[in-house]
Image (tube, helix red, strand yellow):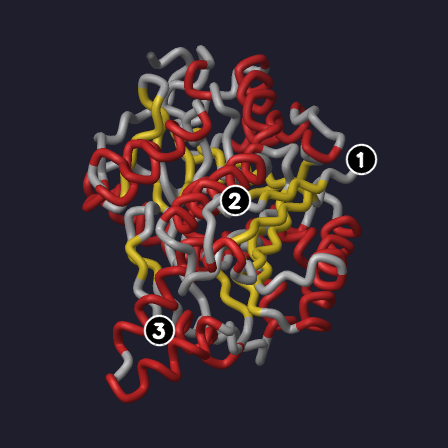
């Protein structure tokens, strides 16, 4: 069943501010997946905080969230509903590339400013060529691949470990397939093998054939690309068949909340844009963490939570920074344009933003291979240690040293 979650937040104050026309943010995320569930909560937190500060130029924010249920058809229909029924000012959100592939044609019908935190598959990029209203926050797969090559080269040099053979188990959809294909190009200097599986998030869940194939290949690194629903069964089935690669790495956009407590999880590696440990080295990440835990009485467990928070805040920061940069003679006119959300003015403001994000890095936009406005360009290499995700690389964000090799029950 389609779930529509509408919140008109912090519009209880009296006076002109309470009567101001709200700025409507239309978000589409998979609420049944931890990525969408926690991203939506982080978006709501950001809306509440911004409204408590007086909104954006005196206009309160209103958040409307629709569950795409990981369905391309429902994700596309959500864009139409948000545009025609709710008349939103911005489209935000997103997770799965396969869902977004169906959404892009609908986004191009309305051409509303879109700030997307998901969809890594670069097969989407040619569809967005020339769409200057589209801002992509998540790195494309080829940008991620380049960062992984850089990271593994640095890790190998620092820790003196050999990585020459890699096995890639990937979910059979757009996300897994394009990520795998991009990885073969990025890691052409390795000896690579791969095999697809049906994700548990989409009705699958038996990975034994893939894992046996991987075990027989004897890789230096095993990498699976799927969703959070795949994390524990892949781990348990690998243990069941006696597959223990020196590096066991998962690359889902989100992990089960209690994965780190699983008895087999110790020293499993992962890719991610953020880890809870970053709050120990980034004041902005700490502020996000404390606010999220206080508001929702749970800890954020996926990097889509700080991405969802940034998804809202980047609009607020862009508009405020644009006004601060304006010359005195231009400020009044620009303020009126941005308050009215005139499209050209808002696009220019977003294009020039420099936002200190809870990811631990500043968010700015610059051209990628095809689109004009690409945000983050790298992922991080992490490892589960004593129940917590630790940053291994980049070394300037490192919160722990690499534990190598991977062993079952390493704790």
Q: Is residue 75 visible?
A: yes
Q: Viewer-proximal residue, 294 or 178?
A: 294
Q: Is residue 175 above or below residue 209?
A: below
Q: Residues within 10 Å of mark 1 (few under 14, many from 20)?
A: few
Give the alpha-carbon distance from disc 1 to disc 3, as whole Å: 40 Å
Residue 310 at what x, y percent from top left?
Answer: 41, 51
> Which residue bears the numbered disc 3?
352
Q: Is residue 165 visible?
A: no
Query: Given this view, does label 2 or label 1 mark the residue nearer the observer?
Result: 2
| Mark 3 element type | loop
Give the residue furthest to the bottom.
Answer: 329
Looking at the image, is mark 1 or mark 3 earlier in the sequence? 1
Q: Which mark is residue 1?
A: 1
In the rendered structure, the answer to whether residue 193 lies left or right of residue 188 reads right
Give the alpha-carbon distance from disc 2 to disc 1, as whole Å: 25 Å
Quarter of the image for residue 161 reads: top left
Q: Viewer-proximal residue, 121 or 361?
A: 361
* Residue in view at x 71 percent, y 42 percent: 4
Give the residue furthest to the front.
Answer: 15
Query: Given this view, does label 2 or label 3 mark the residue nearer the observer?
Result: 2
Residue 143 at what x, y percent from top left?
Answer: 43, 60
> Which residue bears the numbered disc 2?
9
Looking at the image, is mark 2 or mark 3 earlier in the sequence? 2
Q: Viewer-proximal residue, 175 or 61?
A: 61
């Amino acid at each position: 069943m389609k779930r529509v979650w509408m919140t008109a937040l912090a519009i209880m104050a009296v006076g002109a501010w309470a009567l101001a026309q709200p700025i409507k943010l239309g978000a589409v995320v998979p609420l049944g997946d931890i990525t969408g569930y926690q991203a939506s909560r982080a978006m709501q937190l950001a809306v509440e905080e911004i409204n408590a500060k007086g909104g954006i130029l005196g206009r309160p924010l209103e958040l409307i969230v629709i569950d795409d249920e990981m369905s391309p058809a429902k994700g596309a229909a959500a864009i139409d509903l948000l545009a025609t029924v709710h008349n939103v000012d911005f489209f935000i959100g997103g997770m799965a590339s396969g869902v977004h592939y169906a959404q892009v044609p609908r986004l191009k019908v309305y051409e509303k400013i879109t700030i997307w935190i998901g969809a890594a598959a670069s097969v989407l990029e040619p569809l967005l060529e020339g769409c200057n209203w589209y801002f992509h926050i998540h790195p494309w797969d080829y940008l991620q691949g380049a960062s992984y090559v850089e990271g593994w080269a640095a890790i190998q040099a620092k820790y003196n470990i050999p990585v020459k053979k890699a096995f890639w188990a990937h979910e059979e959809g757009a996300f897994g397939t394009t990520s795998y294909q991009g990885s073969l190009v990025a890691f052409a200097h390795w000896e690579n093998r791969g095999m697809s599986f049906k994700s548990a998030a989409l009705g699958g869940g038996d990975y034994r054939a893939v894992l046996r194939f991987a075990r027989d290949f004897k890789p230096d690194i095993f990498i699976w690309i799927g969703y959070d629903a795949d994390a524990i069964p892949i781990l348990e089935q690998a243990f069941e068949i006696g597959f223990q690669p020196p590096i066991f790495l998962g690359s889902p956009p989100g992990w089960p909340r209690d994965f780190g407590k699983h008895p087999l999880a110790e020293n499993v590696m992962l890719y991610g844009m953020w880890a809870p440990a970053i709050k120990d080295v980034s004041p902005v990440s700490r502020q996000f963490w404390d606010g999220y835990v206080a508001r929702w009485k749970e800890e954020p467990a996926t990097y889509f939570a700080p991405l969802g928070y940034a998804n809202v805040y980047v609009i607020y920061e862009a508009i405020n920074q644009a006004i601060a940069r304006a010359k005195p003679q231009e400020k009044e006119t620009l303020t009126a344009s941005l308050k009215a959300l005139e499209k050209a003015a808002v696009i220019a403001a977003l294009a020039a933003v420099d936002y200190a994000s809870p990811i631990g890095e500043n968010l700015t936009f610059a051209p990628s291979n095809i689109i004009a406005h690409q945000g983050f360009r790298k992922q991080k290499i992490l490892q589960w240690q004593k129940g917590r995700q630790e940053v291994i690389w980049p070394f300037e964000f490192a919160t722990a040293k690499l534990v190598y090799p991977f062993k079952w029950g390493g704790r």
